[in-house]
Image: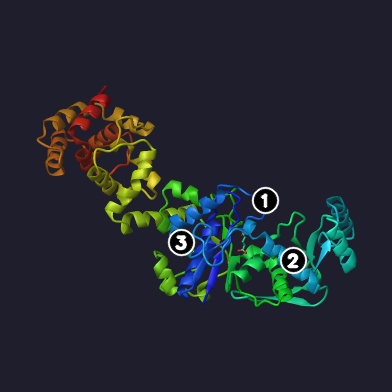
Amino acid sequence: MVVTRVAPSPTGDPHVGTAYQALFDYVWAKKNAGRFIVRIEDTDRARYNAESEARILAALRWLGISHDEGPDIGGPNAPYRQSERLSLYQKYAQELIEKGHAYRAFETPEELDAIRKELQQQGQRGGYDGRARSISKEESNHRAAQGEPHVVRLKAPRTGQTVLHDQLRGPIKFENSGIEDAVLLKSDGFPTYHLAVVVDDHEMGITDAVRGEEWIPSAPLHVLLYQAFGWPEPRWYHMPLLLNPDKSKLSKRKGNTSIEWYRDQGILPEALLNYLGMMGWSMPDGREVFGLQDMIENFSWERMSLGGSVFGWDKLKWLNGKYIREILSLDDLAERLKPFMEKAGYTWQNDTYLKQVAEAMRARFETLQEFVEKSGYFFTDNYPVQEKALAKIREGAAYLPEVRTLLAKLPSLEAEVAEPAFKSFIEQKGLKAGAVMQPLRAALTGVLETPGMFEVLHLLGRERVIARLDRAIQ
Ligand code: GLU
């Protein structure tokens, strides 16, 4: 049985890095007919954000990554929020003290500051020298019983090595002399990440801990905790980082890291998921378009490369465009466009019309939001007129009245009728097609890039065409 988990901290926007972790956790669990858990690591009360948890869960749901256990759906390992599991961490911290693997430390924040400075001056790394180790058991118990504020620290071995067996990298050795007596339980009774992650992964039966590479430096501490408790370690997988296009670690400052931002731009969940699947991983046949099921069927860690992958907007947009053009049905596409159109305040006479416009525009937009931005003239008469479109209208001003007359008297604006009529008009006048088409296009749409002119004429219909021409002529 494989049990995996993603353990986001509810501190802000749902991060694409969380989705990346969740995707690989989910795929690996499902590949092995296992379970995937969402656990909320909310012990950092200073950074806690009340809405964040619901937004993270909604973002994962939107992406189609469904968990088997979690704070919203419960499960056999409830509760799934660390803030609701405090007594568990306290119990285990106590157990470590009794076994001699942890100790209470009573320094005040000022004393800790002084110790840190002292160590720095001596050129030593770390922030604590372990001085409370020498407090006797009796004294420690007595001071705790008196209610003296304290933290619980790991008594890390001072010699030897700790080995992290990373499934993707092989063994990584750490000198114990470099491992600090990390705080496990804070004075307010909350655990630190280190204690909570180990206790919860153990208690929840996590067999495979998949998490970001940034946790490798903390991993020896976690290995030591497993050893101190006498628990078997999970298999460790430290995933490569997502990078900005300049190869720095993906960050809010340089790119957009919020899943909601991509959703609001009109990136499709299946495209975002597909793109995250391409981060450090590839399909055996090299196919770029693949879905969750494809990934589950073809997944293996051997195909994971560790270099770190650029999470770039251009490539994501390209992939999204591919879904829009080649994979979604027209009905599906129109349904997904609707909320974007509504949000922009557009109305449409009926769904058939929306579908026709979507079909005409299909090769011309890569996100749902781009459709809204580029298709406005199909839905309102108050579309903006671009500078260069205005220039074209001026250039063609001489012909537009005649074009208006021609279009007004044609029996219909269907391409079969309008196209030949146009051709003969242009030939009679001895003009080039573009000399008439571009000014007409500009007059009807306010831009110079649109679907084919005859498609536009047909979609707009005679009434709107004539009204817009009149306006342009004026
Ligand atoms: N709460 C940690 C984070 O936000 C989880 C790390 C882990 O998966 O162990 O990244």
Please provide percent x and percent y for residue 445: 30, 35
Please say which color scheme the image uses.
rainbow
Q: Which residue type carries mark 2?
A: Ala
Q: 431 or 147: which is nearer to us?
A: 147
Residue with the mark numbered 3: 65
Q: Which residue is mark 2?
A: 93
Nearer-the-camera pick, 439 or 41: 41
Q: Residues within 10 Å of mark 3 (few under 14, many from 20)?
A: many
Q: Which mark is residue 102?
A: none
Please rate how many residues cluster around mark 2, counting C-alpha atoms within 10 Å: few if below 14, some from 14 to 19, many from 20.
many
Q: CA distance from mark 1 to mark 2?
A: 20 Å
Mark nearer the N terminus (3 vs 1): 1
Of the residues tagged 1 and 2, which is closer to the observer? Answer: 2
C-alpha separation, residue under disc 3 versus residue under disc 1? 27 Å
Q: Which mark is residue 45?
A: 1
Q: Quadrant of the C terminus?
A: top left
With 281 as the anchor, is 379 left or right in this view? left
**Residue appearing at x 77%, y 55% in the figure:** 187
**Is any part of residue 135 visible from this angle?**
no
In the image, residue 116 above or below residue 203: above
Asked whether, in this view, residue 277 is left or right of residue 167, the answer is left
The CA span between labels 2 and 3 is 34 Å
Judge left or right: residue 111 versus residue 369: right
In the displayed structure, does residue 291 sit left or right of residue 126? left
Residue 211's spot in the image, x, y percent? 59, 65
Residue at 78% in and 62% down = 152
